[in-house]
């Protein structure tokens, strides 16, 4: 019997509770400078498009990074944005067949509920699906969990002042 779940596009959904103003959380999540700081392990740096500051709707950024031992470039575009409640970035060029990353922010009882929904489609057909099942989804989940932990830590301390001007 075929397992049709194996053929579906992988989806990662994460929720992080942050004790900080919603605007600060939203801006840290779209800060090019903070992204580079929070992804130092993979040596991510913005090399084209918006390369510093806060990325806006319809703007692109090209990231160069080392993932799984391979230097890669991915260009993402902010396709939707409503300050300070959500934005969506999508891959327009890069290693994946597609990436769709929705970021939502909601104030609840003085805290911010930040939710990531990250959908991706690997290249290489069945080989990509096997890579998803064996390691890629786990790798990307760890990557996003680390980044969310960094956003939380930065937003809840004075560190945010290094990246934002509010």
Image (tube, rainbow, N blue to C red):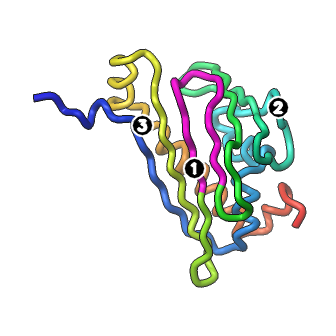
Residue at the spot x=62%, y=23% of the render?
Answer: 94
* Magenta span of residues: 87-103
Q: CA distance from mark 3 to mark 2?
A: 27 Å
At which x and y percent is residue 61? Answer: 76, 34
Residue at the spot x=38%, y=30% of the render?
Answer: 132
**Would residue 27 appear left or right of 12 to someone viewing this image?**
right
Q: CA distance from mark 1 to mark 3?
A: 16 Å
**Would residue 49 appear left or right of 105 to someone viewing this image?**
right
- Residue lying at the far bottom of the rendered structure: 109
Task: Please tell me in which quadrant of the rendered image residue 157 appears.
Answer: bottom right
Pointer 1 with pointer 3, Cβ within 8 A: no
**From what the image shows, is residue 112 above or below residue 12?**
below
Q: Which residue is mark 1?
A: 102
Residue toward you, 59 or 72: 59
The N terminus is located in which quarter? top left
Is residue 100 highlighted in magenta? yes
Task: Please tell me in which quadrant of the rendered image residue 10 appears.
Answer: top left
How many other residues sit within 10 Å of disc 3, few (<14), some (14-19) or many (≥20)?
some
**From what the image shows, is residue 37 above or below residue 76?**
below
**From what the image shows, is residue 27 above or below residue 136?**
below
Element at badge 2? strand
Q: Which residue is mark 3?
A: 137
Mark 1 and mark 3 lie on one chain; the one further toward the N terminus is 1
The tally of labels here is 3
At which x and y percent is residue 28? Answer: 74, 56
How many other residues sit within 10 Å of disc 1, few (<14), some (14-19) or many (≥20)?
many
Foreground: disc 3 or disc 2: 2
How many other residues sit within 10 Å of disc 2, few (<14), some (14-19) or many (≥20)?
some
Element at badge 1? strand
Q: Residue 37: which disc?
A: none
Q: Residue 49: which disc?
A: 2
């Amino acid at each position: 019997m075929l397992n049709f779940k194996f053929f579906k596009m992988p989806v990662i959904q994460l929720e992080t509770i942050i004790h900080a103003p919603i605007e600060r959380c939203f801006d840290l999540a779209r800060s090019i400078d903070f992204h580079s700081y929070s992804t130092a392990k993979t040596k991510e740096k913005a090399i084209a498009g918006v390369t510093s500051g806060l990325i806006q709707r319809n703007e692109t950024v090209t990231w160069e990074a080392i993932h799984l031992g391979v230097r890669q470039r991915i260009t993402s575009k902010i396709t939707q944005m409503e300050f300070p409640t959500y934005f969506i970035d999508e891959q327009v060029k890069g290693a994946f067949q597609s990436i769709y990353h929705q970021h939502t922010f909601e104030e609840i009882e003085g805290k911010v509920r930040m939710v990531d929904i990250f959908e991706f489609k690997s290249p290489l057909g069945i080989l990509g699906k096997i890579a998803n099942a064996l390691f890629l989804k786990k790798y990307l989940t760890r990557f996003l969990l680390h980044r969310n932990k960094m956003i939380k830590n930065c937003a809840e301390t004075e560190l945010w002042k290094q990246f934002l001007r509010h």
